Amino acid sequence: MSIHQSTQGTRTSGPGPHIRRGPFIRRGIAAAALGVLVASCSAQQAGDSQTRPVGTSCPETITRLIDPSKTASAEVNLAVDKTKSFIDSPDAQARLEAQVRAATAKAVDQAQALRVSVFTGSVATVRVVFACPVLAAKYNNPAAREKRTAHLRQVAGDQVWAAVRDTAPGAGGRGSSIVGGWAFLAAAAPLAEQRHAVMLSDGRGKQEKVAVDLSGFTSVSMFSVGRVAASAADTKSTTALVNRWRTWLTKHGAPADGLTVTSGELQ
């Protein structure tokens, strides 16, 4: 995958996800089985707020297409900001769908674990809408691998986007949508040894003093910063938002060699 970068973004060198200069790191071994996943994706604490999981097990439409004998090379934790400023227009919805499908396709192509959540207010608003320990296509004949993988890519993309589109985040809680989203990602139970945190958000929210530790992730990425639903932010304000979130993420443990913050889109 690559980023189409419409305005200025910042990225350190290293293995940041979904960008032209390098895909997700594929090293390491996976560590999650289907039976463990349901428990690991149950309601989790972050501070004094509790998440409200929805669809925390891998859907049957997906499990029948994946190979349970495989383990994931890495996991992708995708958090989607569903505040109106970010999603409330047809163009914004189309951008969001394309990015959600791109993240899902990448997870399938690299046989990764995938957890997807939506949020609007704080960690209390987070709802997990999709979680699978590995997206490795099942096939009997090696000649069918490409076809089976393409089918899984389509089915999983449809399933994940429908879950993101149709699930309303929970209500209430303290903190901005963005800090709450990062707090959930930081507290979520690991699905694999190599972990990648990805957020889709316009970056418009306060940076409350909430305990967030992102040091356990191999890479941390934030896409669409400044891309409000109504119109694109001007270059100056977008650059300020990019720099502001890059500083905040670094302060909260994001790896210097795997940090991406950009107004560009995940592709």
Image: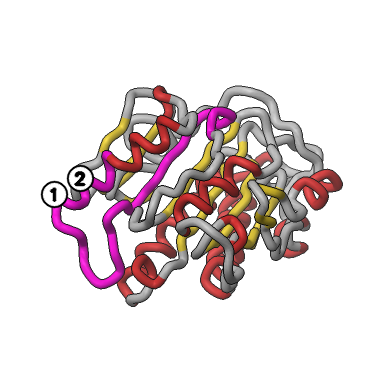
What is the x, y in percent for residue 256? 40, 24
> Dot 1, how many residues are within 10 Å of its Cα: few (below 14), some (14-19), or many (20+)?
few
**Residue placed furthest toward the right:** 35
What is the x, y in percent for residue 195? 59, 34
* Residue in view at x 14 percent, y 57 percent: 234
Give the label on residue 102, or none: none
Q: Is disc 2 placed on a helix, strand or loop? A: helix
Query: Does residue 217 belong to the magenta stretch?
Result: yes
| Front residue of this view, candidates 186 and 95 | 186
Magenta part of the chain:
214-243
Q: Label 2 is placed on what type of residue?
A: Thr
Which residue, given by chain and number where applicable, does mark 1 sit on?
Answer: 236
* Residue in view at x 71 percent, y 58 percent: 62
How many marks can you see? 2
2 and 1 marks in contact (CB < 8 Å): yes
In the picture provided, is 116 more to the left or to the right than 257? right
Give the label on residue 239, or none: 2
